[in-house]
Amino acid sequence: MPAPKAILLLSGGLDSTILLHHYAKRYRLHALSFDYGQKNRREIYACNQVAAVSADQLESHEWISLPSNAFASSNMLTGSGESAYIPARNLLFISLAANRAAAQNIETILLGLVPTSEHDAPDTRPEFVIAMERALRTGLNKPIRVMAPLYHMRKQDWLRWAKTDRDCWNALRYSYSCYRSWPPCGECNACVARADAFKQIGEADPGLRDT
Ligand SMILES: [Zn+2]
């Protein structure tokens, strides 16, 4: 029997890249990415690079382009600041993933969320994921599971797994996490969390190869 299908939200960051490679062994993955006018266009490039080097692990990769005014002005869109939090962004992304899942008779959506700090955006927390699944069960003809399976281990523990998987480690060379710039600034929250995780496992970040 073929593996079940799943929609995977792919940003090209560290976490969704690890999620892709870990769950490609259990699901036939259809990656879904969003261009919502983010000012840091390197994120788009990196996401395409990750998908390209992970082609053997993916059934498909689709971009959804949102109009540049889909989200009200925020730091992330204006490129002026630090926060990655855009209110209701994950709510919209999961809703659009549910549309694709329902249209293609896919029962699972996978999110690359990892536990970090109590300061995380509220729409990255487990209770939000559970609430979204409940809303989709109510609002769709057929239930869809919303899973954030990276929650059960810390970022550095996932990196230890990634080190054992050659394809995943190679894909991490192309992954990109910085909120601000290319080369990565090394100072924003995303850069600090990423650097800390690599430090914890005693490995150099392969994503810094070109810097
Ligand atoms: Zn940065």
Image (spheres, rainbow, N blue to C red):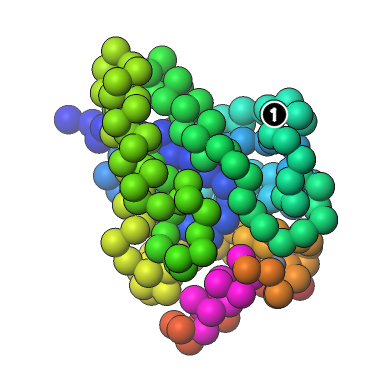
| Magenta span of residues | 190-199
Res. 136 image quadrant = top left
User: Residue 150, relative to residue 138: is it above or below?
Assistant: below
Q: Position of residue 93 (x, y in %)?
A: 52, 34
Where does ligand 1 appear, by image quarter? bottom right
Which image quarter holds the C terminus?
bottom right
Q: Which residue sits at x=69%, y=34%?
A: 71
Q: Which residue sits at x=57%, y=38%?
A: 89
Q: Position of residue 7 (x, y in %)?
A: 41, 34
Report which residue position mark 1 lands on.
70
Name the amino acid, label 1: Ala
In front: 167, or 130?
A: 130
In front: 196, or 86?
A: 86
Q: Residues within 10 Å of mark 1 (few under 14, many from 20)?
A: few
Check disc 1 and report its element: helix, strand or loop: loop
Q: Position of residue 32 (x, y in %)?
A: 52, 34
- Position of residue 99 in the picture relative to residue 133 (left or right): right
Q: Which residue sits at x=27%, y=17%?
A: 142
Res. 152 image quadrant = bottom left
* Residue 116 within the magenta-colored segment of the rendering: no
Which image quarter holds the N terminus?
top left
- Position of residue 93 in the picture relative to residue 101 (left or right): right
